[in-house]
Image (spheres, grey):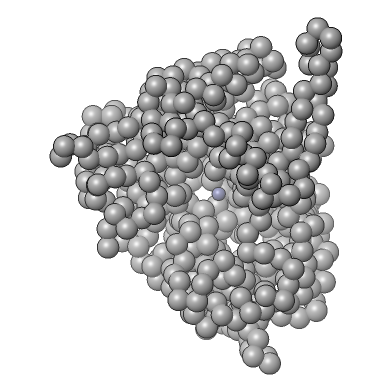
Amino acid sequence: MDVVQTSAVNFYENVSAKEVEDFYHNMLKTAGEKHPMLGLNSKLVKEDGKLVEKVWKSGGMYGSAIDRVIENLQKAIPYAENPQQAKALQLLIDYYKSGDLKTFDAFCIAWVQDTAGTVDLINGFTEVYHDPKGFKGDWEAMVEYNDPDATEKMAIVSKNAQYFEDNSPIMAEHKKASVKGVSYRVINVAMEGGDAAPSTPIGVNLPNSDWIREDYGSKSISLNNIEDAYGKAGGALATAEFANDPEEVERAKKYSEACGKMHTALHEVIGHASGKLNPNIAAPHVTLKVYASTLEEARADLVALYYMPDPKLVEWKLMPDGEAYKAEYDSYIRNGLFQQYRRIQPGDDLEEDHMRNRQVVAAWVFDKGKADNVISKEVRNGKTYFNINDYAKARELFGQLLREIQRIKSEGDFNAAHDLVEGYGVKVDPEAVKEVRARYASLPTKAYSGFVQPKLIAVKDAQGNITDVKVETETDFVQQMLRYGKEYNFLPVKN
Ligand SMILES: [Zn+2]
């Protein structure tokens, strides 16, 4: 079927997948080597038989809301912590005014180089997961501040980025000779909006432009207060229901917090930043198309899974001991092959990239380990369980799959990407979905979590200077969403 015409997103109107591809591939021909992410900030429509981009910018599509973004960025500039941060903010404003993606790249470069501040932001049309063709970015925003203690602890991961690259199971020709500028901070979120709310990521690595990452590096953050909240929101009860044995439950209790933070750090800092493309191979969304995002997430997860048993992590005091990684393996397999089905209906296939990625990884390792009984599937009293019998072998298999997915990305091997994702990451047994949903029905946890944002209220003195910020918390999620609808409804009904 036509993935654009049958898609629920509103990035395209009256255009087919083929027309989208032709349009951007044509543009790519004359775009030069270090080109921006084409199509990132526009809707592509057909008008009078011609394809036109409606650019999201001041005076363009969504202009009335973008003007409010500009207004607030302008207010932030006098408070910038250093000239580099002020420069980045100004470039972001210029980009919102012109809609020029080259200016967005200039912003991304200035933003990557702004590492001295204690406060930072993410702001722009960013992640392309929702576009079946992988061109259009969802708008998102985040304001965050550093957690210095946790950052110092994790800094050892980015300091040793080259160790991870050199010892990776990927092929020698796909390794970076020198891994650049992997900056990692543990942060707390002050406010999130757009695509980052009310459901939020727990780790972010930006910018997404491959050439900027290679030439200037990227910034990785782990969202500490979000991870803490997730940890306290009832995951333990689900583990008790789905874990194969009391040993696994104990292990999860003891290690899951450390494992979660370590997985995010390795996924973001080492995973997304590692490996390189072969010469003259286009970016993955061009070569691997609809499978690019799924495999990129799988690649980053596999780097984390492969390195979690590394004794260096214990030596560096990032993991409590040599057994801890087993808790991560247990939960990854359980979730990838089973628990994550709580988010779909019986009869559905997997469509979301992260869900596909987790199933590709878990199902591939399950399948390839069958002969050696690496992971067994057990059914007791009508309930399904998964048990890892050989952790060392599981690690070896994670390494093999990492090598293969890096090869697919580096070579732009579309056929292999297709076979891997369609073969392992899409189809789901409806009976398994029914069982997972039934077992979750009795637990007080929901399939997705939405967050309530703080209300930040400026306290002013008699002269009108801001002297403090008061935090008020809205306790009712529905109330929050209704308030957003009233207070932040800057778009005309018809745009
Ligand atoms: Zn990722």
Q: Quadrant of the C terminus?
A: top left
State the image quarter where residue 8 is shown. bottom left
Residue that appears at 55% across and 52% down = 300
Is 85 positioned to the left or the right of 103 in the image? right
Q: Residue furthest left?
A: 49
Where's residue 427, x and y in %?
Answer: 43, 73
Q: Residue furthest bottom?
A: 381
Q: 11 or 150: nearer the eye?
A: 11
Q: Is residue 149 above or below residue 356?
A: above
Numbered disc total: 0
Q: 423 or 416: nearer the eye?
A: 423
Where's residue 421, x and y in %?
Answer: 41, 64
Where's residue 238, x and y in %?
Answer: 72, 71
Residue 360 makes an appearance in the image:
yes
Is 149 positioned to the left or the right of 297 in the image? right
State the image quarter where residue 485 is shown. top right
Q: 255 or 134: nearer the eye?
A: 134
Q: Is residue 471 above or below residue 318?
A: above
Residue that appears at 52% across and 62% down = 355
Residue that appears at 69% across and 33% down = 144
Q: Quadrant of the N terminus?
A: bottom left
Where's residue 18, x and y in %?
Answer: 22, 50
Residue 193 makes an appearance in the image:
no
Is 403 positioned to the left or the right of 156 in the image? left
Q: Residue furthest top?
A: 463
Q: Is residue 415 above or below residue 248?
A: above
